[in-house]
Amino acid sequence: MTPPETIRFDPEEFLRFGANGHAGRLGVRYEAHGEDWVDLALPYNPALVGDPESGVLASGPILAMMDVATSLSIWLKLGMFRPHATLDLRIDYLRPATPGRTVIGHGQCYRITRSISFIRGQAHDGDPGDPLAHVAGTYMFTEALP
Amino acid sequence: MILPPYADLLRLSADPEDRTILVMPFDDDVIGRPGFLHGGAIGGLLEMAAIVALKYALEEEGGGRIKPINVTVDYMRGGREKPTYAQGTVTRLGNRVANVEANAWQDDRSRPIAAARMNYLVARP
């Protein structure tokens, strides 16, 4: 049976649409996606540095990218856009990002209930086996189901 | 206190009446969905407020370097199109670890839009 005609959620297009918001200002780009995950890229930029002595990126931009990546992963798993708000987001900074390297943020949604989505993710700067940050959090849908 | 480049991107400045309160003006660079602040920008502001509070507390004890271990942000209300304020409080400043909390609000300090708890590694000279 052919599935009903629906417009699948497209994270690349969604990100382009919001290109002049905070994620756009940070330079966050689409990389890849699957059924319940998305990879985004945060290219190195001196304007995002948190420690001028070492040139290491501030933690804020990585938190912001992971917020976007994990949000997108929910809409991917759901197969559509549905407005939600971040309830909480925890990030463990496993090591500093290497100055000059692009940071890749992998966001995954592993459970969606009627009102809450549960997410996790990792960030790395070249080797996914050597992550620099780990995140976990929840989002709440802001509009009731029809 | 000289804030790092990322604080300039968020256009943060210290409140003239209380140097530990940071102000983030609303503009296109911090928008998430239309009409609302981006959760990441609020998180960035909270982290910066925590760092400012911790740096001042450390200065009184001879200074030192800090590294973030983790941050947990709770989002309570949507941030609207107006200035956002944030202030950090050092709950405990140990020899090696500091525990810091930070709150962000807009019109009314008793109605926070977000709060964060952070652990920092401290390296004293």
Image (cartoon, rainbow, N blue to C red):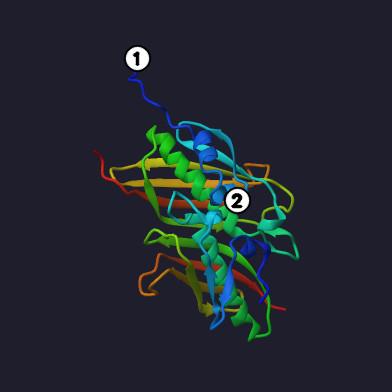
How far from the left and from the top, in percent, is residue B121? 61, 69
In percent of the image, x 40 and y 74: which residue is there? B109
- Residue B94 lies left or right of residue B111; in this view the side is right
How far from the left and from the top, in percent, is residue A136? 46, 51
Residue neighbourhood size for the residue with mark 2, other residues' Cα within 10 Å, grouped as few (<14), some (14–19), many (≥20): some
Checking the image for residue A2, the label placed there is: 1
In percent of the image, x 37 and y 44: which residue is there? A83
Does B7 appear above or below A32?
below
SS of the residue under disc 2: helix
Q: Quadrant of the N terminus of chain A?
A: top left
Does B38 appear above or below A9?
below
Residue that sits furthest to the bottom in the current view = B60
Instruction: From the image, tell me which residue sits under label 2.
Output: A25
Q: Amino acid at mark 2?
A: Arg
Q: Give the tally of numbered discs.
A: 2
Say whether disc 2 or disc 1 marks the residue closer to the N-terminus: 1
Chain letter belonging to callout 1: A
In percent of the image, x 58 and y 41: which residue is there? A40
Closest to the observer, A139 or B96: A139
Residue that sits furthest to the left in the current view = A146
Query: What whole-number distance in Å separates the C-alpha atoms at marks 2 and 1?
Result: 41 Å
Chain letter belonging to callout 2: A
How far from the left and from the top, in percent, is residue B99? 52, 73
Residue neighbourhood size for the residue with mark 1, other residues' Cα within 10 Å, grouped as few (<14), some (14–19), many (≥20): few
Q: Quadrant of residue A87?
A: bottom left
Q: Quadrant of residue B4?
A: bottom right
Q: Amino acid at mark 1?
A: Thr
Q: Quadrant of the C terminus of chain A?
A: top left
Residue that sits furthest to the top in the current view = A1
